């Protein structure tokens, strides 16, 4: 599952919780979640992503720095 947020505000844990809830609509065994945010993430969101272990958080700055 993927979620994009194009806002200057940091994405909070509520957005991650919603992504996790929506992902349960699909019945896959191995699921990886990606959350992309222009403005970054709150400390709570980062901590929950680390706790869950199957969540990748990426900011706009990180995306544009990727060497292809």
Image (cartoon, helix red, strand yellow):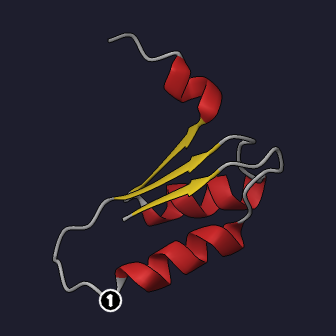
Residue named by callout 1:
25
Image-based side of 10 in relation to 63, left or right = right
Image-based side of 58 in relation to 31, left or right = right
Image-based side of 44 in relation to 58, left or right = right
Q: Position of residue 22 (x, y in %)?
A: 44, 83
Q: Quadrant of the N terminus?
A: bottom left
Which residue is at the far left?
29
Name the residue at 47% across, 85% down: 21
Name the residue at 59% across, 64% down: 48
Question: Badge 1: how crowded within 10 Å, few (<14), some, or many (20+)?
Answer: few
Which residue is at the far right?
9
- Answer with the quarter of the image where residue 31 lies: bottom left
Front-lying residue, 36 or 32: 36
Q: Position of residue 28 (x, y in %)?
A: 17, 78
In this rendering, the answer to whether 6 lies above or below 49 is: above
Disc 1 element: loop
Image-based side of 46 in relation to 1, left or right = right
Q: Position of residue 67 (x, y in %)?
A: 39, 10
Q: Position of residue 42 (x, y in %)?
A: 77, 53
Q: Quadrant of the C terminus?
A: top left
Which residue is at the far front?
6
Name the residue at 72% across, 57% down: 11
Name the residue at 51% across, 63% down: 51
* Numbered-mark total: 1
- Answer with the quarter of the image where residue 39 lies: top right
Front-lying residue, 6 or 52: 6
């Amino acid at each position: 599952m993927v979620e994009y947020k194009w806002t200057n505000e940091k994405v909070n844990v509520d957005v991650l919780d919603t992504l996790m809830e929506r992902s349960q609509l699909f019945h896959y065994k191995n699921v990886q979640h990606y959350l992309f945010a222009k403005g970054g993430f709150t400390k709570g969101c980062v901590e929950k992503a680390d706790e869950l272990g199957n969540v990748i958080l990426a900011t706009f700055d990180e995306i544009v720095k990727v060497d292809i």
